[in-house]
Image (tube, helix red, strand yellow):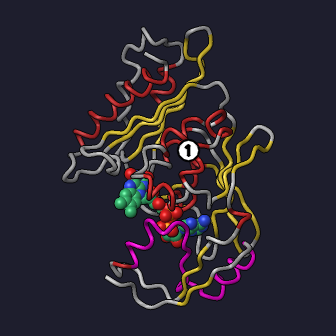
Amino acid sequence: MIPAAFDYVAPTTVDEALAALAEGGDEAKVLAGGQSLLPILRMRLNAPETVVDLGRIEELRGIREDGDAVVIGAMTPYSEVVKDPTVRLHAALLAQAVEEVADPQIRHRGTVGGALVHADPAGDVGAPVLALDAELVIRGPGGERTVEAADFFRDLFETAVGEGELLTAIRIPKHTGWVSHYEKFVRVSHQWSIVAVAAALRVEGGTIAEARVGLTNMGSTPLRARSVEAALVGRSASDLGDACDSAADGTNPPSDLNGDADYRRHLARVLTRRAVATALGS
Ligand SMILES: Cc1cc2nc3c(=O)[nH]c(=O)nc-3n(C[C@H](O)[C@H](O)[C@H](O)COP(=O)(O)OP(=O)(O)OC[C@H]3O[C@@H](n4cnc5c(N)ncnc54)[C@H](O)[C@@H]3O)c2cc1C
């Protein structure tokens, strides 16, 4: 289908974009890579009067180091994140998860910021961002604020980014030297996650000193498997024991044609063990 007619604005600065959003009010919609928004417009599930395209705003794009953090501009496409040496060195888990997003065409257009604000619980970016304790930088008419990933995802397709605001950057604390793996379960390649697990581990002398585990599609938002994280400390590749068995505790997974909630709980336990074992190289 063809989208309903809308006014198109293509600002070149964040201030101009915020002004356009303020002018458009709740009839304005932000366009990033368009990989989620354009299908929505074409199906006429949304018919904004104004579309504010962020594609020409250079300040929203790129990856840089800032002290003990890696800062990724919200409009940085997946394809740049995957191949970026800074991300690979200090936040490898994110690169590993982004590699699993859809296909090369979608990774070429889709952006990390767009995925986070879209907040599809089956999306692959939320769990690693949550597991890596990232901070999300948001700008609006009232200025700039920073929200921890744990407070960013509010509900299904709902985040801390309010009307008239923009997500401008993602700040990820450096996890240099950590081992990690993103284990995604799908029926056919290039599919959305039925369940996926993001695991990052700091290993000292052969045992796990710190663990971070994020779950994809085990509830209305990405989730942390905190009890697994605690249980993994002190374990080693040859002695994981039952440390991953509580992966589904406190989750509320959906039931759909791909599997019911119990099946997803089973997957969460199996995939967590697999993600941890693979990260440890076993
Ligand atoms: C066939 C297909 C398969 C896919 N498979 C996967 C998959 O396996 N895994 C996966 O994770 N994703 C998948 N996706 C989704 C893809 O990752 C999207 O690119 C992503 O969800 C949205 O990013 P975008 O840059 O395209 O954002 P857009 O579609 O442009 O925007 C998405 C939403 O976020 C808002 N928005 C965007 N940027 C900002 C910002 N900076 N500030 C405020 N609001 C903003 C928009 O207004 C819109 O509501 C798939 C998409 C398609 C079409």
Location of the N terminus by quadrant is bottom left
Q: Relative to 247, is 51 above or below?
A: below
State whether residue 118 appears in this view.
Answer: no
Q: Callout 1: 10 Å neighbours few (<14), some, many (20+)?
A: some
Q: Amino acid at mark 1?
A: Val
Residue nearest the observer in this picture, 93 or 156: 93
Q: Residue at x 48, y 31 (%)?
A: 181
Give the position of the C terminus as an image quadrant: top left
Q: Is residue 216 above or below residue 211?
A: below
Q: Is residue 133 left or right of residue 44?
A: right
Q: Residue 230: horizontal and vertical position, in percent?
A: 51, 24
- At 35% from the left and 31% from the top, the residue drawn is 271
Q: 264 or 100, which lies in front?
A: 100
- Which percent across, then down, holds residue 96? 50, 38
Residues rendered magenta in the picture: 14-41
> What type of secondary structure mainly makes up the magenta span?
helix
